[in-house]
Amino acid sequence: MAKHYDYLFKVLLIGDADVGKTSLLDKFAPTPASDQSPISTIGIDSKTRYLQVCGRRVKLQVWNTAGQHHTITSAFYKGTRGVFIIYNATSEKSFKNVKKWLDNVKNHSADSTVMMMLGNNCHLKDEKQVSWERGKQLADEKGVKFMEVSAKTGQNIEETLNILSKSMLEQESSVIATGQRTSTETQGSRCSVQ
Ligand SMILES: Nc1nc2c(ncn2[C@@H]2O[C@H](COP(=O)(O)OP(=O)(O)OP(=O)(O)O)[C@@H](O)[C@H]2O)c(=O)[nH]1
Ligand SMILES: [Mg+2]
């Protein structure tokens, strides 16, 4: 039977407990509606999402982790091509911990892994403790991509998947062509939801 995709990428969702990883996964790869709020993740679970990027059929296998574990071991990173490092924009603490998560990814994953930092809950303007500017600044410092998102409103969800997928495709071509990493130029997008 013919394959339904040209590229298969494994992607991980990591970050502190309660930053909204499970909620974002539900937006990335919606399944039949559930009215229930997500419960704290205990182990890991995954969902699949197909999308077209640069004329290629991409299959994303998105793995969700439990924030309580604080570290993710090398076994989880095996074969991972992209990682979303998530913080909650209404929680300073979760933003501070992003550095630890970034170190965790760098220590355990392949150099070619594409990293993207996501500031969730960007629609909660009045409760925000972390501005877009601070998020973008940290992402630039660390050489990773950045986007503010909302699992609640769906803001920037599709853009985020497209940016990561495009970058993983570029990385794939560069590894095949030269065996080297492409530029780690960062990108960012403001959340325009009021
Ligand atoms: N208002 C609002 N609530 C959100 C958003 N994202 C997540 N939540 C809520 O925040 C709580 C935690 O979200 P989860 O998606 O379970 O967080 P998690 O990162 O998966 O947490 P762990 O599995 O414990 O690591 C849930 O009650 C969600 O309904 C968001 O964008 N806006
Ligand atoms: Mg969860």
Image: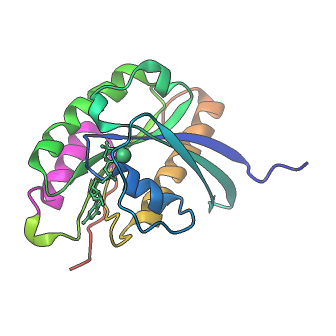
Where does the image place residue 122, in percent across and percent down from the top left?
23, 65
Q: Is residue 48 left or right of residue 45?
A: right
Q: Nearer the viewer, residue 71 or 163?
A: 71
- For residue 140, say whether it is visible: yes
Q: Which residues are magenta?
A: 128-145
Where does the image place residue 109, in percent across and percent down from the top left?
44, 25
Q: Main secondary structure of the magenta part?
A: helix
Q: Nearer the viewer, residue 186 or 155?
A: 155
Where does the image place residue 33, in percent across and percent down from the top left?
51, 69
Vertical relation: 60 (above or below) 76: below
Q: Would residue 140 be counted in the magenta stretch?
A: yes
Q: Is residue 4 left or right of residue 104?
A: right
Q: Would residue 184 be counted in the magenta stretch?
A: no
| Quarter assignment of residue 53 | bottom right
- For residue 185, say whether it is visible: no
Residue drawn at x 27%, y 26% is 103
Where does the image place residue 175, in percent across and percent down from the top left?
59, 31
